[in-house]
Image (spheres, rainbow, N blue to C red):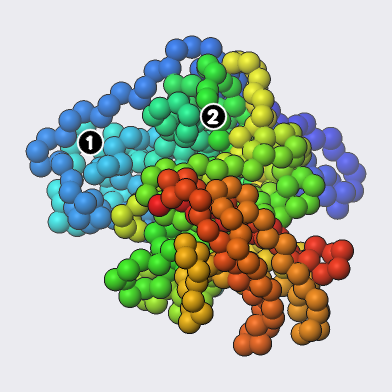
């Protein structure tokens, strides 16, 4: 699609003319980016005014074209066929073959520097089919998604840094990280309306980067039964890979729950919920939900693997940020030399502008093993516009490793459940919560730090004890409690205080029904 440029005026000075040309090219590029977003936004607006039309199901493959999991894994993109490799650009793109469970295809376009775009046609020559035969045209009708490569760990090799594949899912990694949790463009009716709806990106525009580019811009068109939308992703790989997201949504009809900036992860077991018989102490991609409210309060909710669905939320007038975090970075906490859970990224979302009132919602499902994502977190606006009216929301998403987002004062390092040598009273249980951070490190060992512990729901707090752990300098809170009703969840809250100063985030723990 042609996008508008800008006319240049001649100047007598060669140097001034050169500077003007550079500035004009940059301005033209920004114009093209804005025009592309607006143009795709108009497509989304027009789609929202019409009944939803699902993508036609792919033709049933011939018997020889049906792929098992292992056969699908045997199909590999040829690196020498990567988009932009022959031009020696800093970013390269490789495409996913359709097959197995990835049967829905997407249209992918390349946008040139001047703003014109053209579709990238599917080509079987891009793939090494291994022991498989080249598929029929019915199967090979389009790509199932794509991945972006950039030299994130060393200049000699371009690493995979972000992937878009399936519905509106994408995931990214920073330096020396391994893939873990995923993000989505949107979550619709995750709870409260029966079956969840999964909007999907149906078309992408990849904006060709400059020779010295540090970021890659990707625009996407979203469509589903309930809504349409346009998304623009500016991906900047680095120590933290940063994805700046701009979105404009149009409702076709009212929805029960609209989840903004959803994150999807896995929690199978942890120090608060060990798995009997598993030699690995913990198995999870994320260990907690962290929230910063608009008033500056920091919240931490440890994740769990409940027996049945558990939905909780934090309502607030405004939001400063939230994320699913992998705080525990010690290999000895996992002892998994293949999965390397200590290298899985945290994902922290910072709204751009005021998102207004709403709630951060956390949905936790049961999983019988680590192959299933069972954790979802997202922002739910308190009020939505009428169908057809635009919803404009932007945010920054950071994929973080060791130097991840923390509260400024102190934070929870672990939550453990169980008894020790000391005998518990009848019906009593015990939780051990450790805190660390600069606000605590600055205090003398004999400081009068107090734990403010509250039993929020279905619980009687029997006793609390707060003291400095001489072994590692953290501050430990021991909480004894009794659950009133085994069929209902328990909720406890705790934070550390010194004098009138609140030192830590608020630990807000929910124990699922037994």
Can residue 186 be seen here? yes
| Residue nearest the viewer, comparing 150 with 416 | 416
**Name of the residue lying farthest toward the right:** 12
Residue 15 against residue 445 in the figure, above or below: above
Give left or right: position of 394 versus 77.
right
Question: Residue drawn 63% across and 16% down?
Answer: 386
Q: Which residue corresponds to mark 1?
A: 139
Q: What's the CA distance linking mark 1 and mark 2?
A: 35 Å
Question: Residue drawn 20% across and 55% down?
Answer: 70
Q: Are marks 1 and 2 in contact (CB under 8 Å)?
A: no
Question: Residue drawn 43% across and 57% down?
Answer: 267
Q: Which residue corresponds to mark 2?
A: 257
Residue 304 against residue 146 in the figure, above or below: below
Give left or right: position of 514 versus 75.
right
**Name of the residue lying farthest toward the left:** 63
In the rendering, at what x and y percent does residue 133 appear?
A: 14, 48
Residue 128 against residue 479 in the figure, above or below: above
Circle 2: element type: loop
First-in-chain label (1 vs 2): 1
In the rendering, at what x and y percent does residue 152 appear?
A: 55, 66
Give left or right: position of 437 versus 387.
right
Quarter of the image that includes the N terminus: top right
Question: Residue drawn 86% across and 53% down?
Answer: 15
């Amino acid at each position: 699609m042609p996008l508008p440029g800008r006319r240049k005026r001649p100047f007598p000075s060669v140097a001034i003319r050169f500077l003007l040309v550079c500035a004009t090219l940059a301005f033209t590029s920004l114009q093209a980016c804005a025009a592309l977003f607006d143009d795709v936004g108009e497509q989304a607006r027009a789609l929202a005014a019409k009944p939803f039309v699902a993508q036609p199901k792919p033709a049933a493959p011939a018997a020889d074209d049906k792929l098992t999991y292992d056969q699908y894994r045997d199909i590999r993109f040829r690196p020498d066929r990567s988009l932009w490799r022959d031009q020696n650009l800093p970013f390269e793109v490789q495409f996913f073959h359709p097959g197995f469970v990835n049967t829905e295809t997407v249209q992918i376009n390349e946008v040139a520097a001047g703003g014109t775009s053209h579709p990238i046609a599917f080509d079987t020559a891009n793939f090494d089919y291994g022991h498989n035969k080249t598929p029929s045209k019915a199967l090979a009708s389009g790509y199932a998604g794509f991945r972006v490569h950039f030299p994130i760990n060393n200049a000699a090799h371009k690493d995979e840094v972000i992937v878009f594949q399936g519905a509106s899912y994408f995931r990214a990694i920073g330096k020396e990280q391994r893939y873990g949790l995923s993000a989505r463009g949107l979550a619709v009716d995750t709870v409260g309306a029966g079956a969840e709806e999964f909007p999907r990106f149906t078309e992408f525009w990849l904006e060709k980067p400059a020779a010295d580019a540090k970021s890659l811009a990707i625009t996407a068109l979203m469509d589903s039964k309930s809504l349409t939308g346009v998304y623009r992703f500016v991906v900047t790989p680095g120590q933290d890979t940063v994805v700046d997201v701009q979105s404009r949504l149009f409702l076709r009809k009212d929805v029960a729950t609209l989840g903004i900036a959803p994150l999807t992860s896995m929690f199978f077991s942890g120090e608060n919920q060990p798995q009997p018989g598993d030699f690995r102490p913990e198995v999870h991609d994320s260990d907690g939900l962290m929230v910063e409210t608009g008033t500056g309060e920091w919240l931490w909710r440890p994740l769990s693997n409940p027996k049945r669905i558990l939905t909780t939320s934090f309502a607030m007038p405004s939001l400063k940020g939230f994320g699913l975090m992998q705080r525990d970075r010690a290999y000895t906490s996992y002892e998994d030399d293949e999965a390397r859970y200590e290298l899985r990224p945290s994902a922290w979302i910072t709204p751009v502008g005021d998102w207004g009132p709403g709630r951060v919602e956390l949905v936790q499902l049961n999983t019988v093993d680590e192959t299933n994502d069972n954790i979802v977190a997202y922002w739910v606006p308190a009020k939505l516009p009428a169908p057809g009216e635009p919803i404009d929301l932007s945010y920054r998403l950071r994929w973080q490793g060791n130097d991840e987002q923390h509260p400024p004062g102190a934070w929870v390092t672990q939550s453990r459940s169980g008894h020790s040598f000391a005998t518990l009273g009848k019906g009593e249980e015990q939780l051990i919560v450790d805190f660390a951070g600069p606000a605590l490190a600055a205090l003398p060992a004999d400081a009068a730090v107090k734990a403010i512990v509250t039993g929020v729901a279905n619980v009687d707090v029997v006793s609390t004890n707060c003291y400095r752990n001489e072994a590692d300098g953290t501050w430990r809170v021991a909480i004894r409690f009794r659950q009133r009703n085994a069929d209902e969840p328990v909720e406890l809250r705790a934070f550390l205080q010194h004098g009138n100063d609140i030192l830590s985030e608020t630990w807000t723990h929910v124990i699922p029904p037994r």
